[in-house]
Image (cartoon, rainbow, N blue to C red):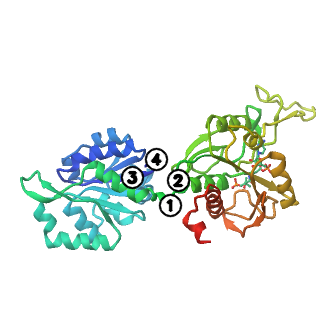
Amino acid sequence: MLKGKRILLIVAGGIAAFKSLELIRRLRERGASVRCVLTESGAKFVTPLSLQALSEDRVYSDMFSLTDESEMGHIQLSRDADLLVVAPATADIMARMASGMADDLAATVLLATDKPVLAAPAMNVRMWTHAATVANVQTLKQRGVHFVGPNDGAMACNEFGPGRMSEPSEIADAIEGLLVPAAAERPLAGKRAVVTSGPTREAIDPVRYISNHSSGKQGHAIASALAALGADVTLVSGPVAIADPVGVATVHVDSADQMLAACLAAGRIDLAVCAAAVADWKAARPAGSKIKKKAGAPPPGIELAPNPDILATLSKPGPQRPALVVGFAAETENLVANAIDKRQRKGCDWIVANDVSPAVGTFGSERNTVHLVSASGVEDWPTLTKGEVAMRLAGRIALHFGLPPKAEAAE
Ligand code: PMT
């Protein structure tokens, strides 16, 4: 359930720090990646080596490390996570959080973050019930910090009462509750999707290729939007400069042949969205070595051969056909008429038509103006960000499967 989620785990100095080792295991079992910040007093209870071995990532401790600050920086560290978890959250670190101190790396990261924070308090029962701690917890809750525990029980100091850190599985459940939307908000849960995105690259020789200007922004946003609604998404991406979306299994390919093979390898799927700008042609016989320029000789002719049509292949009727196949039509003229024709020729259910003429500048930009073409007609959508186009399309897809997401239901 935590596949693709990134947790920054801050381990402060308390005997419960040993449970943080177990917490890392539980989180990784659920698919999350964990990066640790260890305070000076935390290091009295667990070693950086143990945290590093279990998280399989570097452990950060030093506020003034030249290497860390140049490579990562405390600001970056605080932003590169989906959630910050303080476990154990000692009375000391909570007091420092409440008063906005930045006197070590952990406190600085907590002050600099724009991400949600979950604290798992652990301390002696008298420290937990002390007016200062009660006030600090109150302040932190008012500022939006989430809490899990503490539990009641026997403590390492031989006292009994509230103050025991929650068990690692309870903390992992709390993390899931914060990061994984409720089932009602995941109307595509249980549906398997393939999304193609980006350009393809067709080799002419080992150094030259045929390609196009697709950045992958639209296709990647669709993969994220479908995953946000709960779908199990495989993104098949051509070569792009943008990051893989979180929570999506991404397969990287170069050519149209590889893209088709990766789509088919995804197996049985419920829906496919082909947003990739697949090269229609490839070099019929790519040269095995660099084609040399010869003085006085004319430029070499490149014989082209057609690429497989991925959208048409996925749309072919048969028992393997996904219940819904959505294509895109990138057109520079007669946009809607060409898109209507393309939907019929390729056999897909819907076509998202977008104008890619240079004056509009769709490739690589943040915005897109599209028309949704289906058997029941043409819908003109306003100009939206590519993320908004993606969410709207994912909403329509959820409606198609009969499960309206909140936003669509409200429309
Ligand atoms: O990546 P961005 O910079 O964000 O830009 C987004 C986009 C403009 C690339 C995207 O919105 C888009 O329009 N993608 C489709 C581009 C395209 O190749 O259109 P087409 O009209 O040539 O192809 C029609 C459909 O057939 C598309 O779904 C395409 O993925 C598919 N196709 C085309 C050829 C082929 N050999 N196989 C295919 O599957």
Q: Residue at x 72, y 70 (%)?
A: 382
4 or 3: mark nearer the eye? 4
Residue lying at the far top of the rendered structure: 288
Of callouts 2 and 1, the N-terminal one? 1
Q: CA distance from mark 2 to mark 1?
A: 8 Å
Of callouts 4 and 1, the N-terminal one? 4
The amino acid at mark 4 is Lys
Q: Residue at label 3?
A: 7
Q: CA distance from mark 4 to mark 3?
A: 11 Å
Q: Residue at label 4?
A: 3
The amino acid at mark 3 is Ile
Position of residue 114 in the picture relative to residue 191 (left or right): left
Q: Which mark is residue 230?
A: 2
The amino acid at mark 1 is Glu
Estimate the x, y position of residue 154 in percent, counting from the top left.
11, 53
Q: Residue at label 1?
A: 185
